[in-house]
Image (cartoon, helix red, strand yellow):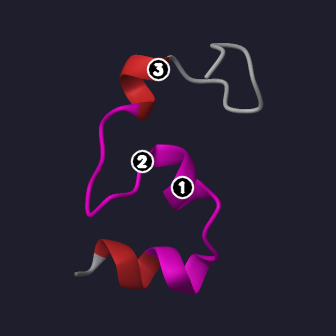
Amino acid sequence: MHYMSRKKLKPEALAVKINSKNIMDVCDLSIDSSYDFLMV
């Protein structure tokens, strides 16, 4: 993945995952879905 692609975070930041989702994946979720994901 290129650094300045659609995801404007460094690969190092995107490499951090919680339950197989990185910060961009969580940001793409709806509010309800992100709440459910974070409350697990």
Inter-mark Cα distance, 3 to 2: 10 Å
Name the residue beneath numbered marker 2: 22
Can you say whether 22 is above or below 32 in the image? above
Amino acid type assigned to the residue bearing label 2 in the image: Asn
Inter-mark Cα distance, 2 to 1: 5 Å
- Place residue 32 in its image quadrant: bottom right
Name the residue beneath numbered marker 1: 25
| Element type where label 2 sits in the image | loop
- Where the N terminus falls, by quadrant? top right
Residue at image point 26% right, 64% down: 19
Name the residue beneath numbered marker 3: 11
The x, y position of residue 33, in whole percent, is 52, 82
**Relative depth, front residue between 34 and 4:** 4
Amino acid type assigned to the residue bearing label 3 in the image: Pro
Asked whether, in this view, residue 22 is left or right of residue 30, the answer is left
The x, y position of residue 15, in whole percent, is 35, 32
Amino acid type assigned to the residue bearing label 1 in the image: Asp
**Label located before the other in sequence (3 or 2):** 3
Residue at image point 30% right, 37% down: 16
**Relative depth, front residue between 6 and 40:** 6
- Place residue 38 in its image quadrant: bottom left
Asked whether, in this view, residue 7 is left or right of residue 27, the answer is right
| Element type where label 3 sits in the image | helix
Crowding around mark 1 (Cα neighbors within 10 Å: few <14, some 14 to 19, many 20+) is: few
Extreme right residue here?
6
- Where the C terminus falls, by quadrant? bottom left
Can you say whether 37 is above or below 32 in the image? above
Start and end of the magenta stretch? 15-34
The x, y position of residue 27, in whole percent, is 58, 56
